[in-house]
Amino acid sequence: MVDMRDRIAMYNGNKLKLGLFGSNCSSGRAFTVLPERWLADWDSNEKLAEMADAAGIDFMLPIARWKGYQGETDFQGTTLETLTWATGLLARTKRMTVFATVHAPLVNPVMAAKCCVTADLVGRGRFALNIVIGWNEGEFGMFGVGQREEVKRYPYGQEWIDAVLRMWGPEETFDFNGEFLQLKDLRIKPKPFGGTRPLMMNAGASEAGRAYALRNCDALFTSVSFPSLDEMAAENEALRQRARDQGREIGVYTVGEVVCRATDKEAREYYRHWIEDSVDWAAIDYMLHLKGLRPQDDPAEYERRRNLLVHGQSGFAIIGGPDEVAGQLADISAGGFDGIGFSFVNYLDELPLFAAEVLPRLEKMGLREKGGNLL
């Protein structure tokens, strides 16, 4: 039997969890035309997962994307579906947790529950679920589904996860009758691995999204930046307290991108080349268009949002040599985060240096268990 605490801790005692974010999508999270940008082919994802597993990386987290954002590179236009992606990677790894990211309004809960159980059995309890309520109208149109009015999106999401949890539970046969879902004579066998359920997370940025995560999930991802470590720590502790007030514990995670090179100078030069000389501005403008933002409405705000998207769609920019990168990750831990999902411009090219130089420094700081890196 596996203990739910093991799942939530991702089967280790690392104080700061580290995960690779977005490798199932072309360009990853970097709006760049650089020739070495990530292509997201299966062979590269498989090799990356095996490398990350051996290095002691805690998790891999995909983005649920169904069409790209145009521009010169068709940013995230080539993507691997996340439930099958996770199942395949779990079969190729032994220690790491692998998430699938599922749009609740686009995937029937019966299908989702069954696919998640299959992935969880393949990974022997290392599967995790990232629930997304969704925002991209063009992607919903691909499925012939319209988005619900905003006030009904999370109530639907609540019914969806309630139904999935019941299917994962001990009941043999039942009906589920809600406002949005009427499911008859439900029978789901087998159940998830070890008599528990997969770890669940949500990255909702709105207050409704946060409330949904605090009520249902084991982890909340947030990309909000704060002026100081103290304010960051206070905000994250407030989120944990809100969960405790509901009788729950929740991990608070963030996102970012890493440029680690042998020296600070080399890393800063590459970062500048990325975000100043090699940006796919047309893809950024298309994403902002989808969000209803136009430069003529508020030029200053539009430019601010534009620049936020340049490096990894917001989050922490962690740039420098190994000492600097380790120090910035230590600051994130001191700011009250349990972990970070981060991206590289090219995951396979850049992970070896990170694993060889940054992870040992984090071990010496007490943020990672010793001996986790098998590379």
Image (cartoon, grey):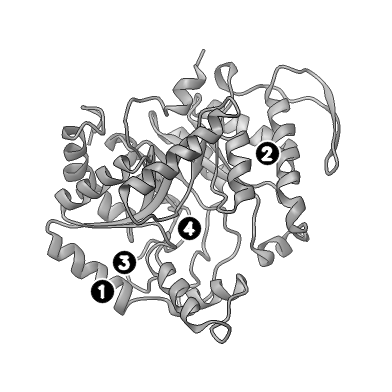
Mark 4 and mark 1 in contact? Answer it, CB < 8 Å.
no
Residue 288 appears in view: yes
* Spot occupied by residue 231 in the image (x, y as percentages of width and height): 37, 48
What type is the residue that disc 3 sits on?
Glu
Q: Residues within 10 Å of mark 4 (few under 14, many from 20)?
A: many
Query: Looking at the picture, does residue 274 appear above or below residue 296?
Result: above
Q: Considering the numbered disc 1 on the image, is that residue within a helix, a strand or a loop?
A: helix
Q: Considering the numbered disc 2 on the image, is that residue within a helix, a strand or a loop?
A: helix
* N-terminal label among 1 and 3: 3
The disc placed on residue 36 is 3
Residue at the image point whose x is 76% and y is 18% from the top: 171
Q: Where does label 2 land, which residue?
A: 112
Q: Is residue 210 left or right of residue 231?
A: right
Report the Cα–Cα distance between label 1 and label 3. Answer: 13 Å
What type is the residue that disc 4 sits on?
Cys
Mark 1 and mark 3 in contact? Answer it, CB < 8 Å.
no
Q: Is residue 356 left or right of residue 224?
A: left
Q: Where does label 1 land, which residue?
A: 273
Report the Cα–Cα distance between label 3 and label 2. Answer: 35 Å
Which of the image's four quarters has the C terminus? Answer: top left
Residue at the image point whose x is 75% and y is 54% from the top: 151
Residue 19 appears in view: no
Q: Where does label 4 land, which residue?
A: 25
* N-terminal label among 3 and 2: 3
Q: Considering the numbered disc 4 on the image, is that residue within a helix, a strand or a loop?
A: loop
- Residue mark closest to the camera, 3 vs 2: 2
Of residues 184 and 326, the one drawn nearer to the viewer in this rendering: 326
Give the farthest residue toward the top. Answer: 1
